[in-house]
Image (spheres, rainbow, N blue to C red):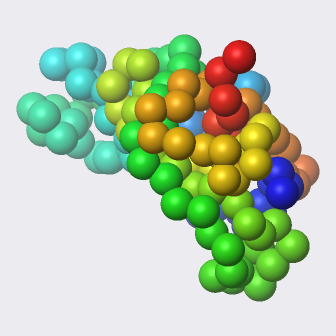
């Protein structure tokens, strides 16, 4: 099943630029302006140089599944109508990793090394989530 999950993640001042970009159909990752490190999830300081001059950079949305799992029983009542679904650790072409849902193929069709690309789904008014699907 390729139904989009409907649980909305917590949004904070720190993560607001990420969610704003997603609403606009862009994938933006936090970037340290001092050393160039891209990192996700957003942090208050760079994990490499501990600098606090942080900004955001739009990335391609291309990536590769590093590992994944297929969820076959609901871990939360909001997911009951979506099982089975695949959750993956995707390595972006630019380096950072994201934990994300995989859509656009059966959950059992997901595999490590699979090239993927970002897609955006509005899950509720004003909230758009990035998912990944097989690159074509």
Name the quadrant containing residue 92: top left
Name the quadrant containing residue 85: bottom right
Q: Is residue 97 above or below residue 24?
A: below
Q: Where is residue 136 shown, x and y percent of the image?
A: 71, 16
Q: Where is residue 63 shown, x and y percent of the image?
A: 49, 26
Q: Is residue 17 above or below residue 67?
A: above
Q: Residue at x 21, y 37 (%)?
A: 46
Residue 122 visible to an observer of this rendering: yes
Q: Residue at x 33, y 25 (%)?
A: 95
Q: Residue at x 24, y 24 (%)?
A: 37
Q: Is residue 123 above or below residue 9?
A: above
Q: Where is residue 77 shown, x and y percent of the image?
A: 77, 84
The count of marks equals 0
Q: Is residue 108 left or right of residue 18?
A: right
Outermost residue, left side: 49
Q: Nearer the viewer, residue 39 or 11?
A: 39
Name the quadrant containing residue 47: top left
Q: Is residue 78 left or right of residue 50?
A: right
Q: Is residue 76 left or right of residue 67?
A: right
Residue 27 visible to an observer of this rendering: no
Q: Where is residue 36 shown, x and y percent of the image?
A: 24, 17
Q: In what quadrant of the picture does the N terminus appear? A: bottom right
Q: Residue at x 45, y 32 (%)?
A: 113
């Amino acid at each position: 099943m390729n139904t989009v999950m409907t649980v909305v993640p917590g949004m904070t001042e720190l993560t607001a630029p990420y969610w704003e970009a997603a609403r606009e159909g862009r994938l933006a990752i936090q970037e340290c302006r001092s050393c160039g490190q891209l990192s996700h999830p957003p942090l208050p300081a760079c994990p490499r140089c501990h600098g606090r001059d942080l900004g955001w950079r739009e990335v391609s949305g291309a990536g590769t599944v590093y590992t994944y799992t297929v969820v076959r029983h609901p871990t939360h009542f909001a997911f009951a109508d979506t099982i089975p679904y695949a959750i993956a650790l995707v390595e972006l072409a630019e380096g950072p990793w994201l934990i994300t849902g995989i859509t656009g193929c059966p959950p059992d069709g997901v595999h490590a090394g699979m090239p993927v690309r970002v897609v955006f789904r509005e899950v509720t008014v004003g909230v758009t989530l990035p998912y990944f699907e097989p690159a074509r």
